[in-house]
Image: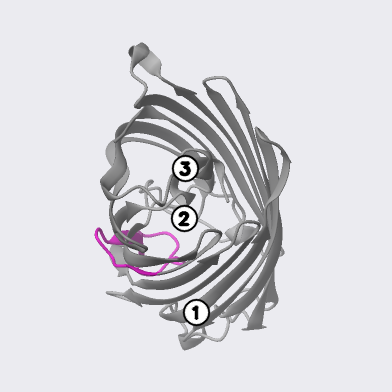
Amino acid sequence: MTFLSFHSNSSEQGISGELGLFAQYQETKSNLSTGSDKVLTSLKNEGASVSESSVFPLGNIQYQWGNHQVFVGQSEDTFVRGVLALELGYRNQINRNSSLSVAIAPTVQDGEVWSNPYLVNDKRAKTDSKGNVYRMKYEHQILTMDFAYYDRKIDTEASPNKALNREGKGYFSKLAISLPLSTSALIEPSVFYQMDDAQGSAMAFDKIGAGITASILSGHYTFVFDGRFSTSEYDATHPIFGVTREEDKLHLGLLFEEREIFGDPQMSLIAQVTYEKSDANISFYDEEGVSFLIGGLYRF
């Protein structure tokens, strides 16, 4: 359960959903970001700072008949956990307290990565990264189990060693428990595991992590805090840096929603700030970023 669960009503028949327009500004410091064309002079230097802004629509639409529902759009993870995947899926309301859903999140817009991230003293070339995610979720009144399989394809993989090939597939699973503190507040601790089977042995990894989401409603206002910490261990020695990569990642997010803006009970103002930091034993992979999002959401 997340903050959107306070507002949703899965038994509502017919068409319903939420649509909005959002603006985002983000600053990132990373050697892997394609937002900067800065030429690397050394693999030991910290990443360049990159600022980007964008405007985009977000939302989802669902059609409910009886205990069945089809849906398309971003899931609730869009706002709470910063995941902007587009999903197309089906949900079955098993009983009053539980449901099972399956969904596919296809590549709608290709992402960009460096063809050879390790190239120094020359301009790096960009290439497209794409893939699909297949997801199954079981939701109970207090329990959520999430399982996903994904694949990843890079148009031009030019890393200098086959052990650095980033193409591959992987699995992700998460278990979360919702603990209501009152009718207007809940916390949701969670644990998650990811196994990424990249073709390059030095890029394949296992990740384990834990998180907590706290949601509070007060009148027309909703406040959501989301925190996660994970640690990753890679399978083989990195052929360039000579050590096996290990990485810790911290994610902190704070969301604010004001409902009934302009006197319209279906309109909401949403603002979000997110901070992420990755700390690896190979400094080339260290990353840090902050993002700000604001926009309006219309529920129908």
* SS for dot 1: strand
> Number of callouts in the render?
3
Q: Quadrant of residue 43?
A: bottom right
Q: Nearer the viewer, residue 19 or 192?
A: 19
The C terminus appears in which quarter of the rendering? top left
Front of the two marks 3 and 1: 3
Residue to which mark 1 is pinned: 170
Which amino acid type corresponds to the residue marked 1 in the rendered image? Gly
Q: Nearer the viewer, residue 125 or 171?
A: 171
Which of the labelled discs sits on residue 40, or is there none?
Answer: 2
Which amino acid type corresponds to the residue marked 3 in the rendered image? Phe
Name the residue rendered at 56%, 28% in the picture: 222
Q: Of the residues under marks 2 and 3, which one precedes in the sequence?
A: 2
Residue to which mark 3 is pinned: 79
Residue 112 on the magenta segment: yes
Q: Quadrant of residue 26?
A: top left
- Classified by dominant secondary structure, the portion drawn in magenta counts as loop
Q: Is residue 226 left or right of residue 28?
A: right
The magenta stretch spans which residues? 102-123
Name the residue rendered at 44%, 65% in the picture: 117
Report crowding for label 1: few under 14, some 14 to 19, many 20 or more residues within 10 A (C-alpha).
Answer: some
User: What whole-number distance in Å separates the C-alpha atoms at marks 2 and 1?
Assistant: 30 Å
* SS for dot 2: loop
Front of the two marks 2 and 1: 1
User: What whole-number distance in Å separates the C-alpha atoms at marks 3 and 1?
Assistant: 24 Å
